[in-house]
Image: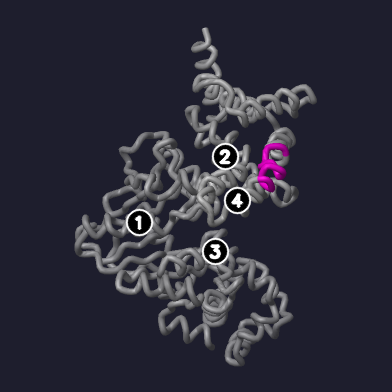
Amino acid sequence: MAGDLFSRSLSKVRALMSGAQARVRAPSERDIERIRQQLQECAESRGGEVSTRQRAARLAETYLRLNDDGRRAILRMIALEFGPDPARVADAHRAYQKAVGSDRQWDAEADLRAAMRSRRLRILTQFNAIPQGVKFLVDLRADLLRYLADDPLLKPLDRELEGRLSAWFDVGFLELQRITWQSPAALLEKLVEYEAVHEIRSWDDLKNRLDSDRRCYAFFHPRMPLEPLIFVQVALVDELADNVQKLLDIEAPLADADRASTAIFYSITSTQEGLRGVSFGNFLLKRVVDDLQRDFPRLKAYSTLSPIPGLVRWASRNPAECAQILAGADWKKLAAAGIDGPDSPHLQALLGGASDWVRNPALARAFREPLQRLAAHYLVNAKRDDKPVDPVARFHLGNGARIERLNWLADTSQKGLGQSWGMMVNYLYDPDRIEANLEAFAAEGRIDAAAAVRRQARA
């Protein structure tokens, strides 16, 4: 009988996790008290393994049925009512201070460590006992991150959960898998759902991205076998790619992968918001490069064709800085195209993200050099806390890449024009320079950039 109840409870959790049933209500006062009691039982680890699994399954089911207010209430309860006992920590610390230098020191240290261990962790760890429990905790942290801005008292819970997820998702536990057209349909659907850089518009589009001249790799966790944590899409080509429309053209002829000289990483997508701050993207690229080197010994270059997602937003917030970067020759060209100064409505609209200029050949020609100069300045010089403002630049430069080349009108989709005036950038991964670049960037914030990009940034 108990086994049947347990199985039914787990089935409900699976259905709720898969979205088969929606959250339905806010909790009543009675619900809150019942949940508090269940959390207390979790914190005290009452009962055996079966009781632990049943309790965790019931809590997960309750949580998943609640609306945002209800979920926030449970998380606040865990954060505020189940931390370490301050009095016990103070007693253990005094005992440790007295024991330093004596035979009791190491036992006192262990007692202090036990006193500081939060009951929140005991509660969170018990969800590991249920199927999809790890995925439940990842999604729970995604909720937590949404609430943090308005509720800083949740921060201790977030720190503890992030630390626990970092341990559970250590790169040593992750599995690198290649995704192909023969992969399970459920996994291919996840690929379409999660792709965040270049939208997958159809099954033909997806099939093209998984063809013989392409590769797609993803990291998986053993407890989340059909949930890619991060994936990278690769094109095997003859030269550095400068246009994503051409790269994704489903009508383009199939290339001979065995004769390719360049691997282009054109999309890297992290899929789990709840794993923010848990870093494994750099390990993914290193593993993929090793895999490609083994399968395609002719490959000589490993590069990205990357978006510049923060460029237009930065320009709109720094119009005076942008105007100063434009040279006298730029203003002459812009004047000839009908833009008579920094206050020109056309220029203000451009800095604000307007895209209609791309259909005007005269404006496009006039904008090319100054906008490329702005992009180079943004990538090389725009910093926050001594690191690049742009998140994609921060990722690749932090992994040891070099800014190799800016590509004009490389992405003329609405998204591409709106975020970077259609420009994209190649980050080059040179195996002989990766480690030196990584160390220089981490220690000094030093950015490696090709000479042409540096000249544009200085100008």
Instruction: Give the spatial CA distance, label 4 vs label 2.
Output: 38 Å
Q: Identify the image quadrant of residue 24.
A: top right
Q: Residue under label 1, please give it.
A: 234
**Could you tell which of marks 4 and 1 lies nearer the N-terminus?**
4
Q: Where residue 319 sits: x, y (%)? A: 69, 77
Q: Residue under label 3, please give it.
A: 391
Task: Confirm whether residue 42 shows in the render.
Answer: yes
Tell which of 17 and 109 is nearer to you: 109
Quick one: label 4, few (<14), some, or many (20+) residues within 10 Å?
A: many
Can residue 85 be found in the magenta stretch?
yes
Q: Where residue 435 sits: x, y (%)? A: 36, 70
Q: Residue under label 2, please give it.
A: 139
SS category of the residue bearing label 3? helix
Q: Residue under label 4, please give it.
A: 96
Residue extending furthest toward the right: 29
Left/right placement of residue 126 relative to residue 289 reads right
**Could you tell which of marks 1 and 3 lies nearer the N-terminus?**
1
Q: Nearer the viewer, mark 2 or mark 3?
A: 2
Asked if 269 appears above or below 190 in the picture, the reply is: below
Q: Nearer the viewer, mark 4 or mark 3?
A: 4
Instruction: Give the spatial CA distance, label 4 vs label 1.
Output: 55 Å
User: Which amino acid, mark 4?
Assistant: Tyr
Q: Nearer the viewer, mark 4 or mark 2?
A: 4
Instruction: Give the spatial CA distance, label 1 vs label 3.
Output: 20 Å
Range drawn in magenta? 81-91
SS category of the residue bearing label 4? helix
Tell which of 138 and 90 is nearer to you: 90
Task: Confirm whether residue 249 shows in the render.
Answer: no
Quick one: label 3, few (<14), some, or many (20+) residues within 10 Å?
A: few
Marks 4,3: beta carbons within 8 A: no
**Could you tell which of marks 1 and 2 lies nearer the N-terminus?**
2
Asked if 39 appears above or below 215 in the picture, the reply is: above
